[in-house]
Amino acid sequence: MAFLKWFLLIFTLHSFMPTPISSNLSLTKEALAQIPLNFLEFSKKPEIMDWMVNIRRKIHENRELGYEEFETSKLIRAELDLMGIPYKYPIAVTGVVGYIGTGKPPFVALRADMDALAMEELVEWEHKSKVPGKMHACGHDAHVAMLLGAAKMLQHNQNDLQGTVVLIFQPAEEGGGGAKIMLDEGALDKVDAIFALHVTARVPIGMVASRPGPISAAMGFFEAVINGKGGHAAIPQHTVDPILAASNVIVSLQHLVSREADPLDSQVVSIAKFQGGGAFNVIPDSVTIGGTFRAFSKESFLQLRQRIEEVISKQASVQRCNATVIFDERSMYPVNSNNKELHEHFRKVAGEILGSENIIEMQPQMGGEDFAFFSESIPGLFFFLGMKETEGAVHSGHSPYFRVNEDVFPYGAALHASLAITYLLQNPTKYTSPPEFCELGLSGNCSWHAGS
């Protein structure tokens, strides 16, 4: 009798469960096209929109720098707990990695960076930073809110997932190389592909921009101390002038691009720091210069690095000085390159949500992005989400007047969720013995569990 009761209960529950959109693995093009539109409609609901906006504003008021995002991480984990999404924490000090779906392959990841910048906000509004000298001037607070919005939709549709979506909440994108640390600590283990977005005020709202292949350059920073012999400026013959040596170094460094690089292979060497001396009539003992270098291939980047060190050392020697060159290894980012197949997938999904006429194929940019560590390790796709309004001044990222247009949130959340769920539907697992959540360390019987 007891067995019959259990059988009837299970039969009744199964009868009323929603039919998974993926129950038919040979979905029609029309059915696949409807998924992104359903997500967009869901994310535009006032209660969902308000929820994402409130999350973003909480983070914006209490912004934190790289590897210090403890309160931001706490807020993310609280929201994941409320949604019943298991996660791993900490990864890379403050990072969080959540999991939605079967716990089995294929695995697809969505990434949002969390850190703020060390600058004073000059935008006067109700939710201005409460932390002096810190500001979310690059939109990472919005990135977190939209990824949580996508997580809510994916969790709501978890029965439809033919695999696992991995949520990457990453610390320290702004020069801290947080992606590299997360990668080293296993955040992308078993992951087959990864997507990320970045808001931009240079593209109108309702449009996106990306491209296949390199989208942002490899980048690095360097500093050089040029040592001479100081003395009175009226008797320079008794000195070894490091200012003169540094000046020659700077001019010679410009020849690396203008005379050594292939004109069709874009490269940059810029000196942005020059410190030396404190009086009009005293030649200093030393001068410190610093700058950045960029390239669109690993070979060109490594060649630039080698030549920068050679030019600085040898030009200083010509002027009877010696030089020490230091490269900031943590700031070295590889080329951020978009996988061509993932770019086609992105174009299809974005076209369903926004219309194909609202997809811009952009030119590569010289700015650096540490998502490159992820896309260097596995196939990745990085795109820009437009939020430019028709009126008003445009302030780009890293400006103290930077603003986020919160009307863009439904588009970002829907794109995230749609890219992930359709990727899983179109890339069924090839594995014969897939791992369960326990292998990922997320079962209650394992060392990691939901809410850990």
Image (cartoon, rainbow, N blue to C red):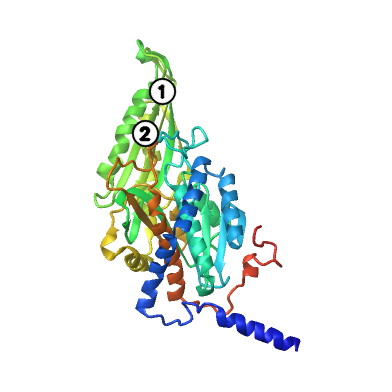
Q: Residue at x 43, y 55 (%)?
A: 372
The location of residue 70, given as percent across then percent down, is 59, 45
Q: Residue at x 61, y 80 (%)?
A: 13
Q: Residues within 10 Å of mark 1 (few under 14, many from 20)?
A: some
Of labels 1 and 2, the one closer to you: 2
With 433 as the anchor, is 143 left or right in this view?
A: left
Q: Residue at x 56, y 53 (%)?
A: 76
Q: Which mark is residue 272?
A: 2
Q: Which mark is residue 151?
A: none
For the residue pair 134 and 381, the one nearer the viewer reads as 134
Q: CA distance from mark 1 to mark 2?
A: 14 Å
For the residue pair 7 and 450, the one nearer the viewer reads as 7
With 130 as the anchor, is 290 left or right in this view?
A: left
Q: Residue at x 58, y 75 (%)?
A: 434
Q: Amino acid at mark 2?
A: Ala
Q: Classify 433 as above or below 288.
A: below
> Where's the N terminus, which quadrant?
bottom right
The location of residue 283, given as percent across then percent down, is 39, 17
The location of residue 325, given as percent across then percent down, is 45, 36
With 257 as the anchor, is 93 left or right in this view?
A: right
The location of residue 392, given as percent across then percent down, is 29, 41
Q: Classify 233 as above or below 418.
A: above
The residue at which mark 1 appears reads as 276
Q: Amino acid at mark 1?
A: Gly
The image quarter in which residue 222 lies: top left
Q: Can see residue 67?
A: yes
Q: Residue furthest top?
A: 234
For the residue pair 177 and 18, the one nearer the viewer reads as 18
Q: Residue furthest right?
A: 1
Q: Secondary structure at mark 1?
A: loop
